[in-house]
Image (cartoon, rainbow, N blue to C red):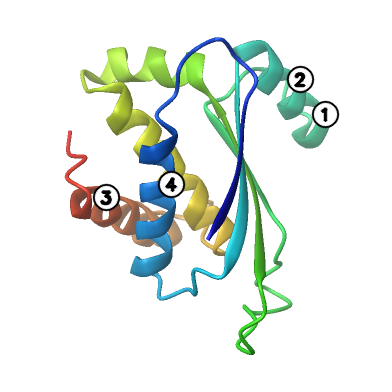
Amino acid sequence: MDVLFENNTNIEVNRELIEKVIAESLRYENVSNNCEISVTIVDNEEIHQINLKHRGIDRATDVLSFPLIDFEKESLPTDGSKIYLGDIIISIERAMEQAKEYGHSIDREVGFLTAHSMLHLLGYDHMVEDEEKVMFKKQEEILNNLNLRR
């Protein structure tokens, strides 16, 4: 598993935790770890600009996912070739705000955002209630497997 990690802030981030959540997400979904994921840590202003540019939403958000595989048209390769899953962009400022709001640790929040984003990269969504239930159950199980409980 290759994690291309970039921190565009002056805030220290637990990279090892992010990599553990990525690895557990892959294991949980039975996806080969012969893959590459890009993770970028940004502040609220940078994620606001990315959200506006790519989604037309004029506000900051906590995490953005940019999958490279369109699961409606294709599936994961099974020939052992490297899988390029996509990009995860996390606003560490928003993660810190949410950790405080929800009364849990920053590790729990960053773990949650990473698991949530990994599931998006693996083809899950939460636009309709049934899909949301499936996705949210999976992300909680991934976090529980890593003892990142609320």
Q: Is residue 18 above or below residue 102?
A: below
Disc 3 residue crowd, few under 14, some 14–19, many 20+, Cα 10 Å: some
Q: Disc 1 versus disc 4: distance between alpha carbons?
A: 27 Å
Image coordinates for residue 25, horizontal then vertical, percent: 39, 59
Q: What label sits on residue 144 in the rendered view?
A: none
Q: Is residue 149 visible?
A: yes
Disc 1 or 4, which lies upstream in sequence? 4
Callout 1, which amino acid? Lys
Q: What label sits on residue 19 in the rendered view?
A: 4
Q: Disc 4 versus disc 3: distance between alpha carbons?
A: 17 Å
Callout 4, which amino acid? Glu
Image coordinates for residue 62, horizontal then vertical, percent: 52, 26
Q: Give yes or no for contact between labels 1 and 2 (Cβ–Cβ under 8 Å).
A: yes
Q: What label sits on residue 53 in the rendered view?
A: 1
Disc 2 or 3, which lies upstream in sequence? 2
| Residue occupying the point 39% across, 32% down | 110
Image coordinates for residue 27, horizontal then vertical, percent: 37, 68
Q: Is residue 10 left or right of residue 105?
A: right
Q: Disc 3 versus disc 1: distance between alpha carbons?
A: 30 Å
Mark nearer the viewer, 1 or 4: 4
Mark nearer the viewer, 4 or 3: 4
Mark nearer the viewer, 4 or 2: 4
Disc 4 residue crowd, few under 14, some 14–19, many 20+, Cα 10 Å: some
Callout 3, which amino acid? Glu
Image coordinates for residue 86, horizontal then vertical, percent: 67, 53
Q: What label sits on residue 49 in the rendered view?
A: 2
Secondary structure under tag 3 reads helix
Disc 4 or 3, which lies upstream in sequence? 4
Name the quarter where the C terminus is drawn.
Answer: top left
Q: Disc 1 versus disc 2: distance between alpha carbons?
A: 6 Å
Callout 2, which amino acid? Gln
Disc 1 residue crowd, few under 14, some 14–19, many 20+, Cα 10 Å: few
